[in-house]
Image (cartoon, helix red, strand yellow):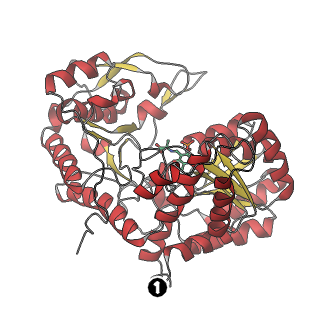
Amino acid sequence: MDYLAEPFRVKVVERVRRTTEEERARLIKDAGLNIFALPADSIYVDLLTDSGTSAMSDRQWAGLMVGDESYAGSRNFYKFQQTVRDLTGYQHIIPTHQGRMAEHLLFTIALTPGQHVPNNIHFDTTRAHVQHAGGKPVDLVCAEGLNPTIDKPFKGNMDLARLDAYLTEQGSNVPLVMVTVTNNSGGGQPVSMENIRGIREITHRHGVPMFFDACRFAENSWFIREREKGYSKKSVREIAQEMFSLGDGCTMSAKKDGLVNIGGFLALNNPEWSEKITNLLILLEGFPTYGGLAGRDLEAMSIGLEEVLEEDYLAFRIGQVRYLGEMLMAGGVPIVRPVGGHAVYIDAKSFLPHIPQSQFPGQSLVVELYRKHGIRAVEVGSLMFAEKDPKSGEVRYPALELVRLAIPRRVYTTMQMKYVGEAVLDLYSRRKELKGLRLTHEAPVLRHFTARLEHMEAATV
Ligand code: F0G
């Protein structure tokens, strides 16, 4: 079979309200054409993010009932600690309320202002936390990782020659190297074990620790099994364990491959860093055996970290995302290739060549997808990333203008994905009718969250 059917059945349902096109037209206008300002219950299929939006299993819900809410020494912590040690092999396990707190703790302790942190591509919060700690984030993804049309198996790979040259040039000015699996900001593309081994060899030689941004470690391990020579007979858990064994630690947002709605952790071997991080954790999050979470959340996370490695689950999960991507490709819609692990990315520049980047083609597509079909996607393009030069006032646009359809885990049926596919194909057939947008309000930083926009009368090239 091309696509595995759902390896679960539905025990509890959540009603989704159907809205009319008129209602949505009013709601999106009131929201200033910004999907972040929409009430979520006016959305039929919500593909804003795959983070914190997973459906928990009956076992996880049952786990909530055995939450031990003791301030110190909760039994759920010991189980969680063991689960993460078994998976990663790292000694010091520090729970956090989500991924960005793990990043904040790590960079605050490990980084001295002025130092550089290489990554394949930093996710926004990772980049922001490196900068917040006074450092400089550097992206060293391989060249094909920036080309949306080239179909290669591991486009999340780091450019090893550039990494080696960079570490030679910077010497002790690099406190650690990060590797993001899968590479979210580059289309959810995986990193191969061979590449990870190469990064290990280079970082070792330069005496620099290597950390994973491990949010989607199970999906990355699945791709290694599917695509890399020598791994087809290994279990996904063995592949994940091998990957972690090559690093010195990881940050984790369990809101992705932990299959929970909130939670994260930092895991590492360095005892000095661990002690300093634990002291900071007490200041910012809470006692080390709960780290900003309830005991029940730790229990749900332990169970989620096991369930995410079930092979039927991963075959279905990766297949469902591929189903949507292949449906769009068959209809001629330009998308980032190959289809990534957690999302389908539409290339909005090719989809809407008549709208210049200064008029936000990605956002125009996002607005119409909601207005016409009740689907929420997110723009990852000029609205999110265009930068004004502070001196000349000239605007620099990002190379890629994408729209991300991120698929929550175990939440939507494949029939709902078919609905999404048909909706995008409908927009594609009417693409010439879509108009550019102009900003009416923008904040000085992270403007996409609160921006307000309006339609241009007619797009002018
Ligand atoms: N690293 C990566 C690769 C991520 O994708 C995210 C979150 C984080 C770190 C931060 O984790 O949200 O738990 O603090 N990504 C979400 C997304 C928000 O929509 O892609 P967090």
Please give the residue where the numbered disc 1 appears in the rendered image: 233
Residue at (31, 65) in percent of width and height: 319
What secondary structure is marked by label 1?
loop
Q: Is residue 223 visible in this depiction of the protein?
A: yes
Nearer to the camera, 112 or 373: 373
Nearer to the camera, 418 or 111: 418
- The kind of residue on which mark 1 rests is Lys
Q: Position of residue 187 (x, y in %)?
A: 43, 53
Residue at (62, 74) in percent of width and height: 242
Q: Is mark 1 within 8 Å of ligand 1?
A: no
Q: Is residue 456 visible in this depiction of the protein?
A: no
Quadrant location of the N terminus? bottom left
Q: Is residue 372 above or below residue 251?
A: above
Q: Which image quadrant for residue 199?
A: bottom right
Q: Which image quadrant for residue 32?
A: top left
Residue at (27, 51) in percent of width and height: 334
Q: Position of residue 188 (x, y in %)?
A: 44, 55
**Residue neighbourhood size for the residue with mark 1, other residues' Cα within 10 Å, grouped as few (<14), some (14–19), many (≥20):** few
Q: Position of residue 457 (x, y in %)?
A: 21, 18
Q: Is residue 140 above or below residue 97?
A: below
Residue at (17, 38) in percent of width and height: 431
Q: Position of residue 224 (x, y in %)?
A: 48, 73
Q: Is residue 289 left or right of residue 13?
A: right
Quadrant location of the C terminus? top left
Q: Is residue 38 above or below residue 101?
A: above
Q: Which image quadrant for residue 455?
A: top left
Q: Is residue 52 left or right of residue 171?
A: left
